[in-house]
Structure formats: structure tokens, C-alpha cells
Amino acid sequence: MWARRILGVLLLAMGLGKLSDVAGYAHALAAFRVIPVAALAAVAWAWLATELASGALLLAGGRAAIAGGVGAIVINLAYAALTTQAFVRHLSIDNCTCFGVHLRQRLGWLVLAQDGYMVAFSVYVAVAALRSRRRSPAGSRARSG
């Protein structure tokens, strides 16, 4: 499915962007003022690891794609929550951190719209992966027996 592959590649690109400068990514996360300073590095590593794993699982397909889709939903909901709270609090964020320190984008309505789209796209991919798994011949045999 093309959507699963696109989301997988996008998550891998986002994770690799963060991996290229984890310290810079952690510093950029600090601007959102919700993660304790002592936890910034751990959160940065966990975030990028989840993106990389979710992207790889989506590209692997099959049952793994369901887990990748769920991971994508979690990551994109977290992004949406992070950016929305900062926007509502009128924080000046120069880097939305989507690709770590690369492709900086100032926080505004466009970023919020992109986050909403990514949540919806992730849900679509996860549901499609689940439905595809249920329709597969192996899934049919398991239910009928």
C-alpha cells in the first residue's frame, strides 16, 4: 500500500534527521518548556527511536505494519500535543523539530495543520494495515478454525 510506504519513509527521514544531531534536537525540544531539562536527552533518544522503529515496521509490511501504524499514531499525537500547547501558550518556537535541527519551521498555524494531517494519515495507515491483515488468507483461516 502506497500510504504505508510513504509514512514509513517519512518517519525514517524524521528519525534520521534527529539522529544526525541528537544534542541539537534535545536543545530544540527545550524550547517547548514541558520536558524537564534532566530528561531532554532521554526523551530525544526515545522519540527518534520510536520514529525509526515505526518507519521500519511500516516498510516491513504484514503484521509489523500494524505495530508501525500504532507507533506512528503515538508519535504524531505527541507532536500535535507538543506543538498545540506551545502555540496556545504563545511560545516563540523557531524550530518545530520535525526533522531535528534540519528543515526548521517556525511554529504557526501551518505546523498545527501539518500535525493534524499526520495524525489522520497515521490513523488511516494503521486501520488499513489492520484491515489488510484481517483480509489475508492466513487471517481467514485463523478465524474460521
Image: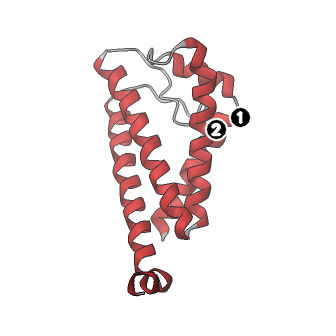
SS label for mark 2? helix
**105 relative position to 49: left or right:** left
94 horizontally vs 113: left or right: right
* Residue 88 visible (yes or no): yes
Report the residue at 41% width, 76% height from top: 134
Tag 2: amino acid: Gly
Q: Residue at x 49, y 49 (%)?
A: 71
Q: Nearer the viewer, residue 2 or 70?
A: 70
Q: Which mark is residue 17?
A: 2
Where is residue 46 shown, x and y percent of the image? 60, 34
Question: Residue drawn at (48%, 61%), measured in percent from left and top?
Answer: 66
Quarter occupied by residue 77: top left
Q: Are marks 1 and 2 in contact (CB under 8 Å)?
A: yes
Residue 101 visible to an observer of this rendering: no
Compared to residue 138, the image places residue 96 above or below, namely: above
Badge 1 crowding class, 10 Å Cα cut-off, few under 14, some 14 to 19, many 20 or more, is some
Residue 7 coordinates in the image, percent (x, y) = 50, 55
Could you tell me the amino acid type at mark 1?
Ser
How many other residues sit within 10 Å of disc 2, few (<14), some (14-19) or many (≥20)? many
Please tell me whether residue 84 is drawn above or below residue 17 in the rendered image: above
Q: Position of residue 106 (x, y in %)?
A: 44, 25
Which residue in the protein does label 1 denote? 20
Question: Is 90 situated above or below 6?
Answer: above
